[in-house]
């Protein structure tokens, strides 16, 4: 991995980790574009983004974080499990769970970000342990640069999403995921891209 690849992947990771779209799928495409990794583009076709639309329609959106109780924690925790499905967004899943139990969009997003701290820390440490044994020594400096870039962009993404959800719905993210999923399926069907792992 060189510095340009690390910066590109850091930007993609930071932009997509906290916004309700699939960060894993976007990283697969960014890795392919930078000739770093041949991943599976079909990961983007799994959609939760429909359940999120349903949550937008039925959610009452009255609760602030100070009003959250045990039901909120259980609902959002169970929704976070959906992020184990390839192509599912962790933040999208948790925001969806929050909307279903009546949380305001902004409050659901804040809670989602708080829940991301242990999940991202644990997965990051696990990945670092694996990278330590797999990566050549010259890749660790680009990895550090990519991590820093991802952190900065991720912070800005959080700020953007909270400000965005104060006045708007998640409809733009739902539409984006549906359009992207259809494009990927058409490209796979036409043989433009392949589902190689």
Image (spheres, rainbow, N blue to C red):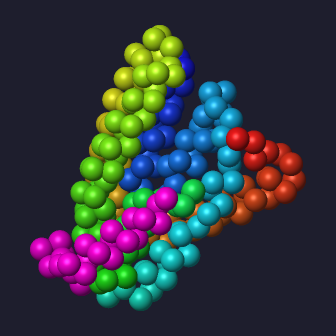
Residue 160 image position (x, y, % from top left): 33, 54
Residue 148 image offset from top left, x and y in percent:
33, 29
Is residue 39 left or right of 161 when viewed as pictured? Answer: right
Compared with residue 118, is residue 55 higher up or lower down, i.e. above or below?
below
Outermost residue on the right side: it is: 190
Q: Nearer the viewer, residue 25 or 106?
A: 25
Where does the magenta region start and end? Answer: 62-84
Instruction: Report the predominant secondary structure element of the magenta stretch.
Output: helix
Q: Quadrant of residue 59?
A: bottom left
Q: Quadrant of the C terminus?
A: top right
**Rendered residue at 80%/58% (across/down):** 186
Image spot of residue 166 (x, y percent)? 29, 69
Outermost residue, top direction?
Answer: 138
Percent across and percent down for residue 191 are 86, 48
Q: Is residue 127 visible?
A: yes
Q: Residue at x 54, y 25 (%)?
A: 5
Residue located at (50% from left, 34% from top):
9
The N terminus lies in which quarter of the figure? top right
Q: Can you see residue 166?
A: no
Q: Residue at x 47, y 74 (%)?
A: 52
**Residue 67 belongs to the span the image colors magenta:** yes
Please indicate whether residue 137 sits to the left or right of residue 39 in the image: left
**Any magenta on residue 134?**
no
Label tally: 0
Residue 55 vs 145, above or below: the answer is below
In the image, is 97 to the left or to the right of 52?
A: left
Between 30 and 166, the residue placed more toward the observer is 30
**On the rendered structure, is 60 left or right of 137?**
left
């Amino acid at each position: 991995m060189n510095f340009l690849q690390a910066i590109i992947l850091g930007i993609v990771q930071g932009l997509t980790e906290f916004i309700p779209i699939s960060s894993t799928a976007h990283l697969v495409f960014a890795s392919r574009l930078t000739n770093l990794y041949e991943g599976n583009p079909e990961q983007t076709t799994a959609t939760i983004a429909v359940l999120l639309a349903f949550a937008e329609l039925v959610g009452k959106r009255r609760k602030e974080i100070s009003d959250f109780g045990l039901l909120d924690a259980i609902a959002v925790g169970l929704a976070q499990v959906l992020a184990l499905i390839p192509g599912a967004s962790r933040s999208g899943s948790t925001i969806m769970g929050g909307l279903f139990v009546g949380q305001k969009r902004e409050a659901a997003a804040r809670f989602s970000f708080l829940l991301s701290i242990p999940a991202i820390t644990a997965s990051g440490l696990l990945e670092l342990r694996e990278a330590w044994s797999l990566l050549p020594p010259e890749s660790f400096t680009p990895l550090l640069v990519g991590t820093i870039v991802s952190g900065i962009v991720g912070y800005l993404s959080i700020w953007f999403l909270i400000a965005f959800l104060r006045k708007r719905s998640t409809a733009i993210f739902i539409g984006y995921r549906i359009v992207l999923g259809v494009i990927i399926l058409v490209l796979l069907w036409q043989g433009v891209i392949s589902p190689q792992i």
